[in-house]
Image: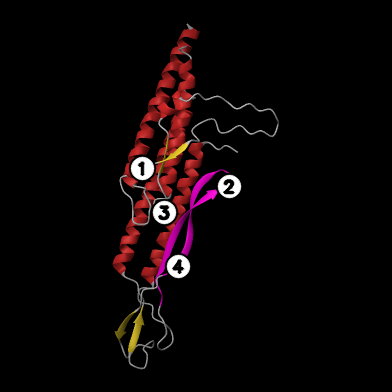
Amino acid sequence: MVIDPLVSSLRIAGSGLQSQSARLRIVAENIANAQSTGSAAGSDPYARKTITFESALDRASGENLVAVKSVGVDATPFRTEHLPGNPAADDKGDVKLPNVDLLFEMADMREANRSYEANLQVVKQSREMISQTIDLLRT
Amino acid sequence: MQPLALFSLASQNASWLSTRQATIANNVANANTPGYRAADVQPFSAVLSHLNLPMATTSAGHIQPASFGGGKVNVKTADSWDVLYSGNSVDLEQEMMKAGDVNRAHALNVNITRSFHQMLMNAVKS
């Protein structure tokens, strides 16, 4: 099946928008849980999530879409703070806090934002090209 | 060259431009995919000079290959403005410039087709 390249470019950019918003969702989860400690004494807190993408071939149309490859867990060690009054503190009074660094999350958010904008730009231009071609019929 | 060949030239160019736009969309969508290499299509002059002979279909099961423009070539690493540590060679600024180029060329192509069509209609009507 041969699909018009302009239509397929809309679909490809759409898959890009989808994966970048999945990335923004992960960033939001990380930021929201930046202070989430474990429930029991001495237990592990929220672990930062990571996301990777892969290029996925859509066999029906031959388009090279982008998809989320995996959502992983960041393996960097947790921060510890001495907070004896915290319910999650161990017998020495240390609390494990999540390995979320807000600076990283902000940088990640900006990058996702930038890629999302670029995909939107492609959608805009493809639509413009399609409507230019349709306008040919109106003259 | 017959003057009416302009229509076939314009439609060939439009098809090349839309293939290029799809390639750019692909690059932008994969801007954060590790190991992805940016791609581009052959220049239009290469498409024009290449004799585009269709393959003979001698049986109902034979499939015609997509006319042209399916010939994507990978951009050499040196041609890309930026290669990331993850092996990704997509540079968003470069892709935006290419997309702007394609858009402008497509507007030109459409307007040429329109004015040629008008010329033809004027000749037919008067």
Among numbered discs 4 and 2, the one appearing first in the sequence: 2
- Near mark 1 (Cα within 10 A), the count class, few <14, some 14-19 or many ≥20, is many
Is-magenta flag for residue A129?
A: no
Give me the residue at 48% from left, 19% from top.
Answer: B7
Q: Which residue is mark 2?
A: A59
> Is-magenta flag for residue A71?
yes
- The residue depicted at 47 percent of the width and 41 percent of the height is A9
Residue lying furthest right: B60
Q: Which residues are magenta?
A: A46-73
Labels 3 and 4 touching (C-beta < 8 A) = no
Pinpoint residue A127: horizontal percent, then vertical percent: 44, 38
Q: Within the image, what quadrant is residue B23 found in?
A: top left
* Cα–Cα span, label 3 and label 1: 17 Å
Q: Is residue B52 left or right of residue B61?
A: left
Q: Is residue A76 visible?
A: yes
Density class for disc 2 (Cα within 10 Å; few <14, some 14-19, many ≥20) is few
**Label disc, if present, on residue B35 of the rendered structure:** 3
User: Chain letter of disc 4?
Assistant: A
Q: Are marks 1 and 4 in contact (CB under 8 Å)?
A: no
**Which residue occupies the extreme top position in the image?**
B126
Give the residue type at disc 3. Gly
Q: Circle 2 marks a residue in which chain? A: A
Expressed as whole percent of the image width and height from the top left, the position of residue A102 reads 31, 68
Instruction: Please identify the quarter of the rendering in which residue B67 is found.
Output: top right
Q: Are marks 2 and 3 in contact (CB under 8 Å)?
A: no
Q: Which numbered mark, 3 or 1, is in the foreground of this view?
A: 3
